[in-house]
Amino acid sequence: MSIAKEFREFVERGNVVDLAVAVVIGAAFSGVVDSFVEDIFGGVLGALGGEPDLSALTLTIGDGVIRYGAFISAIISFLIVAAAIFLVVKGLNAAKAVQKRKAEEDPEEEPIETEVELLKEIRDSLRQR
């Protein structure tokens, strides 16, 4: 099997498209969360503590500068994104569980033949005799 054919089959399975969509949405969501942390959360911290920009929080030791504010901002962003992903996965798992439970409770029943269909079968069998 050629590489091109294998690649085409891989792409046609849909995994690549799903992954690409997830990456794009994740990047966009990450941007929203970063903006939330910097603009809103940072503003609230600034109102409470006097420093609205977390990235401005630094510690200078000798000639070195430790930017712990940017690190705290990154941790907050990560925790918000992780919590959102956790909630989405938890919701999807709950929906799957409900769907599975519903499928187990209501197994597909064969449709009951109507009187008309039964009469047609009787008629056809009498014709064959």
Image (tube, rainbow, N blue to C red):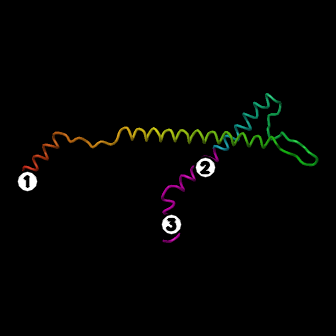
Q: Label 3: how many residues lie within 10 Å, few (<14), some (14-19) or many (20+)?
A: few
- State the separation of the CA atoms marked 3 and 2: 25 Å
Q: Residue at x 39, y 40 (%)?
A: 104
Q: Position of residue 120 (x, y in %)?
A: 13, 45
- In the picture, measured across the screen, residue 128 lies left or right of residue 76, that is left
Which label is found at residue 112?
none
Please tell me which residue lies in front, 94 or 67.
Answer: 94
Image depth: mark 2 or mark 1 in front: 1
Residue bearing the label numbered 2:
24
List the single residue furthest toward the right: 62
Image depth: mark 3 or mark 1 in front: 1
- SS at circle 1: helix
Q: Residue at x 51, y 60 (%)?
A: 11
Residue bearing the label numbered 3:
6
- Mark 3 or mark 2, which has the lower sequence index? 3
Q: Which residues are magenta?
A: 1-28
- SS at circle 3: helix
Is 66 one of the magenta-colored residues?
no
Q: Residue at x 26, y 42 (%)?
A: 111
- Mark 2 or mark 1, which has the lower sequence index? 2
Say whether marks 3 and 1 touch (CB < 8 Å).
no
Q: Position of residue 98 (x, y in %)?
A: 45, 38
Q: Position of residue 82 (x, y in %)?
A: 64, 42
Q: Position of residue 34 (x, y in %)?
A: 70, 41
Q: Is residue 80 above or below residue 125?
A: above
Q: Amino acid at mark 2?
A: Val
Is 27 one of the magenta-colored residues?
yes
Residue bearing the label numbered 1:
128
- State the separation of the CA atoms marked 3 and 1: 54 Å
